Amino acid sequence: MLIRIDADFKAFQHHEGLWGGWSNSIEVASGCSNERPRRAPRGWNGPHSVVADSAGQQIVTCYYQPMVVKLAIDGKADVLITGRELTGPATAQLDARGSYLVAEYAQNLILRFEPDGSYHGRLGRDAQRNLLKFDPATGGVLGSSLLGGFDRPHMAKSISDNSIVVADTWNNRLQRFAPSGEFMGWHAGDGGWQAALPNEEGPTLGSINCPVAIDEDAIGRLLVTVWGSNSLMLLDTEGRAFSVSGLPKLNKPYDARFFHAGAIVADTGNGRVLVMDQLNSSDSVGA
């Protein structure tokens, strides 16, 4: 099910699926509601992430029925990406040129699709451990802890310098790539961004316990949702990592976005969305 909440957090709507639109507005009393749709919304099987494009349209990624869907302002749904390239997409994000960066969690790849939804190429390592730099290649891919490879990546985020930061979830690290797919560095959770090792052949794991989502604010800081440790991490513009303090107890958070001076958090295990007025950070991670 898809839900949208109004700007005052006083009402919400659910989406009827691929053949419908947004429901009538439902008031929320005292911050919660037991209201349910009269029938199950059609056409959504595992909607997993939502992001807005520059026109205010919503880009929805479905995991169990692998596809990426665009919702117009009026709620009309248009399937953008589907087919054999997708098997288990977790998230889709837009890059500077309007292409879609899809984190293919099931295939251990980052896929790029053109603005019209056509396939461009894939990022990761193939079964022979070769680096793929958005090559339009096909064939087997295995999870890899080698730099440039992934183990269940959950998000690829294009940031303000046009580089791509990947939440490499089960390798417990972030990785960074040029728009062309060239490897730029990785982040283990402390010590800042590290350059590639010249002839790196062995496992290279970090200590960020299952990062799943990344957001960027207006000054270039990154907010990282750390699913495995029920926490949020803040990276400053120099790559230094800080723990976000003063949070209510999180349970398996799947996403966090900067929101005004604070953040909004999908606190999945607790079945709630948290809205924080401000972000406080503690000492640098590893300090």
Image (cartoon, rainbow, N blue to C red):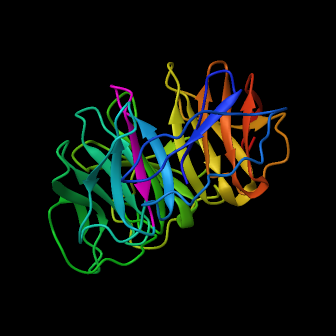
Is 50 left or right of 258, judged from the image as shown?
Answer: left
Looking at the picture, how far across and down is residue 123, in whole percent?
28, 59
The relative height of residue 250 versus residue 76 in the rendered view (above or below) is below
Is 253 left or right of 64, judged from the image as shown?
Answer: right
Q: Can residue 55 be found in the magenta stretch?
A: yes
Along the line of sight, the residue nearer the viewer: 156 or 268: 268
Is 123 left or right of 174, judged from the image as shown?
Answer: left
Q: Which residue is at a point 29% across and 42% down the rendered structure image?
A: 178
Q: Which residue is at a point 72% across and 47% down the rendered structure image?
A: 35
The relative height of residue 184 versus residue 129 in the rendered view (above or below) is above
The relative height of residue 127 versus residue 211 in the rendered view (above or below) is below
Looking at the picture, how far across and down is residue 235, in whole percent?
59, 35
Along the line of sight, the residue nearer the viewer: 143 or 114: 114
Residue 217 in view of the camera: yes
Q: Can residue 236 be found in the magenta stretch?
A: no
| Bounds of the magenta segment | 53-63
Looking at the picture, how far across and down is residue 197, in whole percent?
39, 57
